[in-house]
């Protein structure tokens, strides 16, 4: 079933120290997808089919979302916390994304710890899958999850970006 209330969405790109950051928001301002790219097509492909907009309207800015992105990159690490995010998937992934939003800046966790926080301590692969399928980078801070021993693991937007984000939050 498709959510017909989300036919159009707004998109804007802002410059950051690690490259252009684009966000796509629905009519009520909830982030549907975001990441360090200037190409909205890279983002629309990861939005759940029931939320995917048929049309994107280019904007210069997205109000609170753009202000939060700018403030975060300028050092106000909690600026992203109050931004509403809308993602859909199965029960575990949806819950894992909510849990991930509670991992504080400067306190990264391992995939194993993230699995435990998500209520499935043996499901490390499922926790890693939640990070890989996260469409709302930064607002759902999957960059705060590391491999055991501190290795970075993966990151859709590149390991240099993940390294910068972690150092920025340290």
Image (cartoon, grey):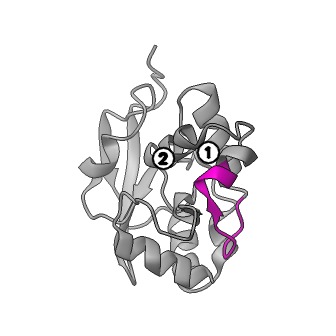
Label 2 Cα crowd, 10 Å radius (few <14 / some 14-19 / many 20+): many
x 40%, y 59%: residue = 154
Residue wearing tag 2: 134
Residue 5 location in percent, x, y? Answer: 49, 27
User: Left or right: where does residue 21 sit relative to residue 86?
Assistant: left
**Residue 42 visible in the shown view:** yes
Is 162 situated left or right of 130 in this image?
A: left
Quarter of the image with the C terminus in it: bottom right
Closer-to-camera residue (122/140): 122
Query: At x 52% / y 40%, what residue is drawn?
Result: 125
Q: SS at mark 1?
A: helix
Residue 12 against residue 133 in the figure, above or below: below
The residue carrying mark 1 is 97
Residue under the image location 57 percent in, 77 percent down:
72
Q: Is residue 2 above or below residue 7?
A: above
Is residue 86 visible to the viewer in this orientation of the structure? Answer: no
Q: Nearer the viewer, residue 78 or 132?
A: 132
Locate residue 38: give its quadrant.
bottom left
Q: Residues within 10 Å of mark 1 (few under 14, many from 20)?
A: many
Tags 1 and 2 in contact by the CB under 8 Å rule? yes
- For the record, the magenta segment spans 103-114
Distance from Cα at disc 1 to Cα at disc 2? 7 Å
Q: For residue 167, what is the image quadrant?
A: bottom right
Measuring from the top left, give residue 61's x and y in whole percent: 43, 66
**Looking at the picture, how far across and down is residue 148, in whole percent?**
58, 62
* Mark 2 element type: loop
Relative to residue 38, is residue 115 drawn left or right?
Answer: right
Residue furthest toward the front?
149
Q: Is residue 169 magenta?
A: no
């Amino acid at each position: 079933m498709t959510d017909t209330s989300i036919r159009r969405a707004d998109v804007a790109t802002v410059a950051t120290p690690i490259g252009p950051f684009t966000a796509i928001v629905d009519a009520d301002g909830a982030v549907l997808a975001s990441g360090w790219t200037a190409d909205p097509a890279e983002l629309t492909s990861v939005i759940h089919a029931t939320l995917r907009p048929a049309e994107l309207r280019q904007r210069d800015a997205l109000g609170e979302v753009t202000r939060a992105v700018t403030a975060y990159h300028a050092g106000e690490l909690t600026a992203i916390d109050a931004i509403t995010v809308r993602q859909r998937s199965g029960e575990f992934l949806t819950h894992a994304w909510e849990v991930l939003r509670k991992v504080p800046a400067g306190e990264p966790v391992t995939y194993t710890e993230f699995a435990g926080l998500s209520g499935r301590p043996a499901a490390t692969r499922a926790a890693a899958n939640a990070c890989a399928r996260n469409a709302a980078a930064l607002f759902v801070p999957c960059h705060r999850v590391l491999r055991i021993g501190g290795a970075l693991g993966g990151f859709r937007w590149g390991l240099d970006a993940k390294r910068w984000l972690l150092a920025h939050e340290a």
